[in-house]
Amino acid sequence: MKRLLLAGLTLFLLIPTTSQASSVKNVYPRLANYFLRWEITDSEANQLAKWDLLVLDMEVQENSRRELEKIRELNPNIIILAYITSQEILDDAEHYNNAYMRQKLASRLYEGWWLRDKDGAKISNWPYTSMFNLTDGALVSPDGKRFNEYLPEFVATEIKASGLWDGVFYDNAWGDVSWVNAATIDINNDGQAESALEADSLWATGYKKMLKQTRDLVGPEFIIVGNGRVYDGYQGLLNGMMLESFPSPWENGGTWTGSMKTYLKLPSINSSPSLPIINIYDKNQANYQKVRFGLSSTLMGQGYFSYDYDVANHGQTWWYDEYNINLGPAQTQPYNLLANSDQEIKEGLWRRDFKNGVALVNSTNKKQTFVLQKEELEKIKGQQDSKVNNGQKINYFILEPRDGLVLLKTATSITNNSFINGYFYRVFNFTGQQVRNGFFAYSSAYPGGSAVILASGSQDEKTSINISGSKGWVTLYRDGKAIASFPPYTKAYNKNLNLAAHIDDGYFKKIVTGAAEGGGPQVRVQSPVGKVESSWFAYDKNLRGGVNVAIADVDGDGELEVITGPGPGTEPLIKIFSLAGNYINSFLTYDKNFRGGVNVAAADLNGDGQAEIVTAPASGGGSHIMIFNHQGQRLASWFAYDAQFRGGFEVSISDTNGDISPEILVGIKNF
Amino acid sequence: MINILHRYLRGRFERYYLKNHWHIVLDLSLIMVIFILAASILFLYIYKPSLPILDGFTKPTVNLNNPPLDVKYSITDRTLDVNESINLNISVKNSGKQAITDIKINLKSKTDLYTVSSLKKTDETDSSISVTGQDILLQSVKNGEEKNISLSINFNRQNTSNRVFILESKISYLLNGQEYQATHDLEEIYIKATLSANAATYYTSPQGDQLGIGPLPPIVGIPTKYWIFWSLSPTADFQDLSLSAKLPVGVRMTGEEAILSGELSYHPDTRLIIWKLDKATTGENSYAKFELELIPQEDQVGEVITLLESGRIFATDQLTGEDVSASFSKQTTNLDFDKFNSGHGEVMPQ
């Protein structure tokens, strides 16, 4: 009958509920927050949504349900685990007005489920708590359950069934118990203490039964993560373990090497998806070296990193410069730079490569200097430890003992937007902060000083088509070699061209051309093979300042628009046209008396589905960058170079660090 | 008037010609003689023939198409630096039959873009020739005589990029008391184009961007990378330009570059870096930027290392067709133009 009930309950729970489908992101760093407050404020919810994985106390589902839902709204891909102590409960949960879940758990407890010593006293491992007997030595309740059956039912019916959680986090998922109360534990309630060996064996068996029961009830998709010293026997039932206070004193000898060996083996013995978590705590929020050491160690594997205050106070929303970085997918396994071929995990100078950068950790007790061989990397441009994260490009590094470093690959190209081949470009975010080092955008495959667009998508870079506009001709290249050319205007026009393009996954769909200075303000929209689809004069056709062009969906209607900026010689009027050349809107970007011409770029910078329009003076003005929406409302403005510098500015928009969100690039011909 | 003439001829016809036909013959003959005499006088007036018989009665005349004072100008070198003097030879020959006196040759610039600042005789043997201000004075030149004047002319160029200087010569002289004047433009003089290239080395851009990579000052065994900026700001039009510099042993090109015009190449056999441009036009700046890498050796500790040496530029002046060349400064790890890092050039031990 019990089996039937269990099977029925299992079937019920396997029917899709509103519980969240979890997905592990394939890029790094993976960030976890071990946030154990029972209530969450709205402000904290906004903050917590930035993490990839949250361990939140189960009380949150009752005390801060709205905030919990908000976190998921803000970050639909987040993984949220419900924290529950698997082997103990507060003695006085009923006295708390915000301990609904604990009270609920406690309400159906049976006296025979407490872990007692040979004298019948409850055993406690943490102040104001009492431990449960997870073994089959616990007595059976009147409804025929032991605690190792009751707890899984509670998780399944009260936690998973709420639909708010992706999984459960079992704290204190120990593989033994004798150390809690040496040689006095009465596992089987016979008034006699079991030997440590026997107690541990019974405990592990009982705990594993609890995990198995949980898995059976919640199904394979619901995540189960444990915390505590890693016991191999449980791992097949778990999706991961937290290594708290890394390198955990209790873990595999208490060394970095021991903890790392455990951490790195977890994915091979855990259920999939594997979600190991490294947690470090320190009362000093600004102990950046400790943060780097923990994060870099975590990056050697596939786990999540968490940093907070203390074992007794996990509840901070501390955010670090390294957290802002998108390293992309991992490209290598970790390797020891101090050992040529011996890659056994041991103290060393460890490195792991990612698509957008590398992680380094010096686990030795010596300062390490290392010269990169024919390689350049870029430090994070951080706000916190500016001595370390100073944004410098480096070809060697010095790493203190027990320190780590996250470095970016240097940006060297602008993709999917037009740039001038050979110009120097600075990289800015929306608000005008320089987010990384500037660089010369140049390839000798294309004419120097001409507009170039490098298409980037999921296809092999060598098969992608790139274009340049030089001497009146648009030239298409594959693998750096010219394969076709066409003149968008008459053959008599032999000056440079302004270019814009709509690119879909590396393929050109539309090419927009404008004549450069010396030509008329004629815009042409063409197919990639040069077929003219529309053509019009954006400004007075007698002007000879050319016309600057961009293409994007500025109003979010799903249709592309062409945005134009005038060349020198007329007022700085930005115009928006349909692809067919029908006028939609216009607005002044600078003082109406400014006659230096305006360069334009457009892309969705803030993720609202509408492309913003970025403008820069083409000549004669300072580096005053303006950002507008399609209605001409100014959203931001800032200076990209020295305010006195008047060299003329090119503007482009491209994702230079692989974080999907594009950056604004402002180029100059010379300093 | 017609009526009067008609009445006169009618009266004469009735009184004479009807009576005797010889009257009409006589009248027509007289009219023809009068016409011939009038035509002869007109011919003589127009052509002023030099009839010996008239010598004693008429003033000498000058054939303006072939004046007796034959002045020829010769400029030794028509392509000059702006601070060089013009060497001008003037040949004055009297091909007439009478002496010509009070000859004055005034030299000045044809345009306001240049001014003649001084004239100086370079041959003092003929004291009958003198120079005053911008005037050359000759007392007289006998018929058949030829005099040569050698001059050194200094000039100033106004604030202009115009490179064509034309001297204008205004001559006046007396022949038999009559003053004659003539004006000539001399051959064009070209001002040599100034060819120069700028070279600078940066670790940090003038606006504070990190360009170079690696330790600064350089450290033994660790690569430090610098960016070389070559630029041309031509004040004249050139073609077939070639900038080159030699890479010292121990310094290498990394392949990172940003060439806005022309082509940059490296020739390992000569260790020359060469930047070639088809043309460079007045007012249009050209830039080539590239990265060099230095890995200092133990024996270079304390030294400032040369990164590029023997910088030369060659080009053809589009106006004159002349080949011109110049050199530019060597580049060192001292980064003279890098305001953020200048002076940090001495190699440090590791």
Image: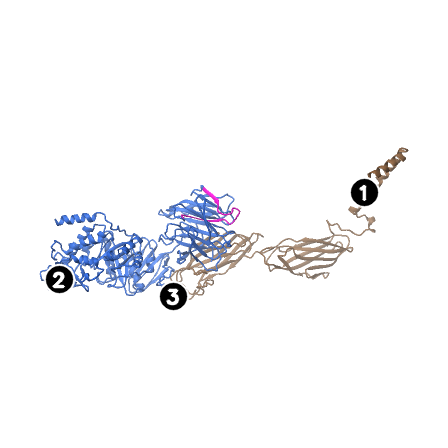
Chain colours: A blue, B brown
Residue B275: percent from the left, percent from the top? 48, 54
Residue A265 belongs to the span the image colors magenta: no
| Contact? badges 2 and 3 (CB < 8 Å) | no
Label 1 vs label 2: CA separation?
158 Å
Determine the image quadrant of residue A185: bottom left
As measured in the structure, the alpha-carbon distance from the residue carrying label 1 to the one carrying label 3 is 109 Å
Residue that carries the numbered disc 3 in the rendered image: B349
Chain at numbered mark 3: B
Disc 2 secondary structure class: strand
Q: Which mark is residue A116?
A: 2
**First in residue order: circle 1 vs circle 3:** 1
Q: Are marks 2 and 3 on the same chain?
A: no
Which sits in the foreground, B235 or A172? A172
Q: Work out whether residue A23 or residue B9 is closer to the camera in this orientation and state it.
A: B9
Mark 1 belongs to chain: B
Q: Do labels 1 and 3 share a chain?
A: yes
Left or right, residue A443 beside residue A316:
right
Q: Around disc 2, counting alpha carbons within 10 Å, would you say few (fewer than 14), some (14 to 19), or many (20 or more)?
A: many
Of all chains, the one bearing label 2 is A
Asked whether A53 or A406 is in front, the reply is A53
**Residue at point 37%, 51% (across, down):** A608
- Residue B39: assigned label: 1
Label 1 Cα crowd, 10 Å radius (few <14 / some 14-19 / many 20+):
few
Residue type (three-letter) at the residue carrying disc 2: Arg
Q: Which of B270 and A311 is in front in this view?
A: A311
Q: Magenta region: which residues?
A: A533-553
Q: Position of residue B252 (x, y in %)?
A: 42, 57
The amino acid marked with disc number 1 is Ala
Is residue A409 depicted above or below A493 in this figure? below
User: Badges 1 and 3: C-beta atoms under 8 Å apart?
Assistant: no
Question: Is residue A340 something that shows in the picture?
Answer: no
User: Nearer the observer, disc 2 or disc 3?
Assistant: 2
